[in-house]
Image: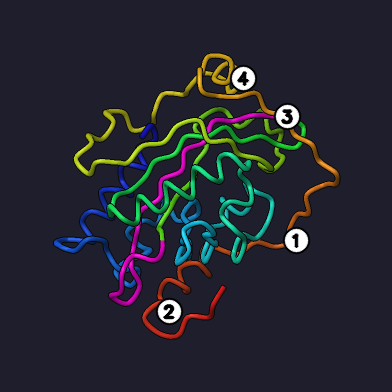
Amino acid sequence: MKHKNSHLLVGYWSRLRKDRDVPDQTDIDPRAVKRMLSHIFILDAINPARPTYRLAGTSLCERFGMELKGVGFLTHWDGQSGTALASLLRQSMKTCQPVCMSSIGASTDCGMVEMETIILPISFNGGEASRFLGMTQILSDATPLGGRPVAFQRLIASQLVRENDPLPSLNIPPPPPPAQQILRNHSRAPHLRLVVSQDRPTASRFQTDETLKRLFDMIGGTVRPA
């Protein structure tokens, strides 16, 4: 994990679960992750091969240019990455371990950035793990996107996360090389080619962080399906 917030979220998840295999969604206090809330999401993953966004913060929705609630998590990933991710999600749920994923995100005109996504298995109302708490952040300079949303992601690395991994010593992680250089230097990173038949629709409004907080607060009661 490169971003300090990824370490912080894993630490919070670890404290919540105590002596259980995974923490429960009803244990999550939005106030404890307030400064990260706009980047946080929750996935429904009863079928790990078809995970769906149940909740998503405003920064994440804006980054992908659409309201993510009810959208498939694999929608923005290429086919090969989607197959690998489905396997990773199954492994994470089976072993009750978080997974950190590094990817290259690209706009429709091939502006590229380095991204990091952390997913952590959780249960709901005391059942078995069937959901994921997650967070996605950009690691590199977002200037190449030119304010345009990420339309495409390709997985370049992943790892199961050990809870005792040390926190980075700096408050802000050092910036990585430009995304184009990462692609040239990374031995596992294939070239990107985007074929787009039409502009990706953008949502006229996004779910607010306040709404996300209220939905968290409602978890103990009736929750409307995504």
The residue type indicated by label 3 comes to Arg
Q: Nearer the viewer, mark 3 or mark 2?
A: 3
Q: Earlier in the sequence, mark 4 or mark 1?
A: 4
Secondary-structure class at tag 1: loop
Q: Note whether 188 is above or below 120 in the view shown.
A: above
Instruction: Tell me the CA gap for discs 2 and 4.
Output: 43 Å
On the rendered structure, is 187 left or right of 180?
Answer: left
Q: Which residue is mark 4?
A: 180
Q: Nearer the viewer, mark 4 or mark 1?
A: 4
Q: Earlier in the sequence, mark 3 or mark 1?
A: 3
Q: Which residue is mark 3?
A: 193
Instruction: Tell me the CA gap for discs 4 and 1.
Output: 31 Å
User: For mark 3, does the 10 Å Cα neighbourhood hold few (<14), some (14 to 19), or many (20 or more) residues?
Assistant: few
Q: Which residue is mark 1?
A: 204
The residue type indicated by label 2 comes to Met
User: In the image as oriented, which residue stretches furthest toward the right?
Assistant: 198
Instruction: Tell me the CA gap for discs 3 and 2.
Output: 42 Å
Residue 141 in picture, x, y percent from top left:
57, 28
Q: Nearer the viewer, mark 3 or mark 4?
A: 3
Circles 1, 2 touching at the beta carbon (< 8 Å): no
What range is drawn magenta here? 111-131
Q: Earlier in the sequence, mark 1 or mark 2?
A: 1
